[in-house]
Image (spheres, rainbow, N blue to C red):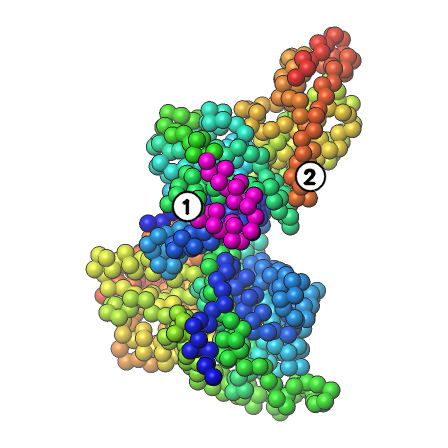
Amino acid sequence: MTTVAEKASVWERELLLTGCQAVSHAVKLADVDVIAAYPIRPYTEVMDQLSQLIADGELDAEYIIADSEHSQFEIVKHASSVGARAFGGSSGTGWMYGMEALVVTATDRLPPLFLVGNRALDDPGAFGVEHNDAMSIRDMGWLICWSSTAQEALEHVFIGYRIAEDKRVRMPMALAMDGGFLTHAQHMVKVPTLEAVKEFLPPYDLGDRVLHPDNPISVAPQVNEDWVIELRRQNWEAARRARKVIKEAYQEFNAIFGAHGSEYGNPYFTEFMTEDADVVLIGIGAVCMPTQTAVRRMREKGHKVGYVNLRWFRPFPTEELRECLGRFKAVGVIDRDFSHGSPDNGGILMNDVRACLYPLRDRPNVINFIGGLGGRDISIDECINMYERAQEAGRGDLPEEIVSWTGLRE
Amino acid sequence: MIKRVEVQYRGVFQKTLGKYIGGDIVQIASRMGKVAFSNGRYSDAPERNGIPCKYFAFVSPDLSEEELEAECGSSLDIADVDVSVVVDDALAKGVEPWGWHGIRPVNEKVGNKACLLMVTRHDHEHLLKFTAKQPYPYRLATLEGDASLAGLWVYKDDLTRERCLGAVAAVDPNIISIEAVEEYLLDTTQDADRVRAAREAYDATLRRVKVVTPDQGIDWPHEVPVLPKWHEFEEGGVAVRGVERGFKLGPRGQNRNDGFLHGTSKTERPVVRFDLCIKCTLCWADCPDECFDPTDDGLYDINYDVCTGCHKCAEVCPVKECIVMVDELQFDHEKSPWEHHKKDPPGYVQWAEEKKGDTRIRYRHVTGQGFEKVKGTTVPVRIGGPGFETVKGTTPAKS
């Protein structure tokens, strides 16, 4: 019998899809059982498209329209607990409104997948991208991963479910993508065959923890100080074990899809022209577009700069990033988020990166740029300016305040 | 090399059309072995009826997908457009995107030797009466047709999409070729009529391209608004001053928010025959944009700067032929029609009837059926009506 990898192609067809639509096609191929929907831009289109796929008879799934995000996430959580592969999603303040359900999905150790179409935390009515929504669950026991292309987002639905549902992990998965820049842009996307997806993604099996009349159990009974710390320790262990599972998942993904054009190196981040770089910038999501063009332009003038595009935020790739960033003289961290009152009033990513680098004896200088908030575009010129500042930091010329704002009217 | 296409469309009414044209260009270019992607100007959202919006397509024969994406994928608006497809010619009077930018010329982003392609029934000379001068030569192409307006969840399948693809191939074959357009349409629709529509539009457009020189067009003193720095406005967010309650009688008596005029949202504007007005107040009461100014003689003047051309007044007016919607490109100014009427009632009636012509637009475009044109009638001046209380009016010429 030939394996899928040996076949002529693992791709069924190429379609013009937005980032949201790409995810919906992946959800279909992942044979999701239960979908709960409540609209909020910019993630909504994934639900539009899924309801269309169901109406067209292409997908057989329960599609439940909730009365709010809180109910929506509860439905997803409960569906997951009865052994259904479940899908939900949201954006911005909608995501925050369902926070209670999000937190308990993690503590109940259930593995549904959510799409977070990143959106500013609203007031005054902003709907452009900011990463604070997805990052708000960073401490709760979630897997959080960003995609920067529609193709990557589609593939990470399979990768995400596989990691989340693994018995060693069983954590909910947030697949994030930048609102507007990725959710709404139309690209040609390769859609894999069902056969290839099935080979990669085993069925969801909760084992004896499945909530079913044939298996009478009580999930999440009342516990207090007598149990909780042990439960948290289990959670902690799962987040640690997830690293091994993530590695395996990408190896398996590469084995099936790698020969056909989709291959991942390091699961956690992609390095761009970093090999002989003196300084790098690191960021998350769509900002990789202008930064990489800036790198190319600066390289043409002989500047040794590179870019690190971070994919996985939780679990944070501590060892891998330490090894990677430790090679450079300075690291500029771009935050499309804010954390007012944090150490140095820096961004969330910067403080994580800096903490990660701290144990190094000879660590790079870290500076921080906050920008692109509320969906403002980060220009190529801004990126070049950030590189120049990083080069100054690389020469030991550190600014008085390591945090600065870019693209701000000042 | 990167080719940039923008589709300028009416928010909501033409959203699907704009997205389809952008997506089609990507798919056709991909079939030609090029790299392409498409997106919309995200800051246009949430779209409002008729507000000028943009969709983009980017095509490159030699860059990698990642390079093209890096160059074009993360900015909200673009400059140096190779082809700007304008699917409603009334956008020639200026586009005012959602907030802060003011009214800008439709050809603002059209680059040197690039092409402004308009779906229109007007000729080049007429369109240039509204279009801004550019410091360099560019091309103006016209594709004969009406604005294909539809609603939010409906799409008017009237071949505008296919014809625009054919026209784009005509004005810049380096983006998509007509052969590739034909092959794509045949492949995806199996409908020879669609292929034919694209080819015919291609042939017709080739004959209707003119070079616009820097002396052609109008002066357009457009200032980009300067927004305050972060420390220059009150903490706690942008506060917009409220509009005062109530109104004063008299011309321009209405209180409005001048921050956003809406006037560029219209494809047609209402023309009023004041002599027929019975002062029922319905237009004034039902206008969603408060563009009717109560005058001291009990009539309602129109402020076209804030009129969105929504048709509501024409719909509610109980008097036949009193308020009629007329193609926006027939008007070259936004002045008060009431003042015109007041100064010269017979002359105004004559002018209004000329503008109205002999067809009337029946507005059903939110249902996806577009609009239909029906025959209008010319109603004689109402003796004793406003402006004709003491004088005998002349009967307007049959148009």
Identify residue type, mark 2. Arg
Chain under callout 2: B
Please tell me which residue is depicted at 57% across the width and 54% down the height of the picture. A125
Residue B154 x, y percent position in the rendering: 64, 48
> A115 or B126: nearer the eye?
B126
Q: Which residue is mark 2?
A: B364
**CB atoms at circles 1 and 2 under 8 Å apart?**
no
**In terms of secondary structure, what is the magenta stretch mainly?**
helix
For mark 1, give the secondary structure. Answer: loop
Query: 10 Å neighbourhood of mark 2: few (<14), some, or many (≥20)?
Result: some
Please name the residue that numbered disc 1 is placed on: B177
Q: In this view of the protein, can residue A134 be seen by the observer?
A: no
Indicate the position of residue B89 as horizontal and vertical percent values: 53, 33
Q: Residue at x 59, y 76 (%)?
A: A112
Query: Residue, x 46% and y 78% (percent of image)?
Result: A4
Residue B160 in the image: above or below residue A108: above
Which residues fall within the magenta stretch? B180-203
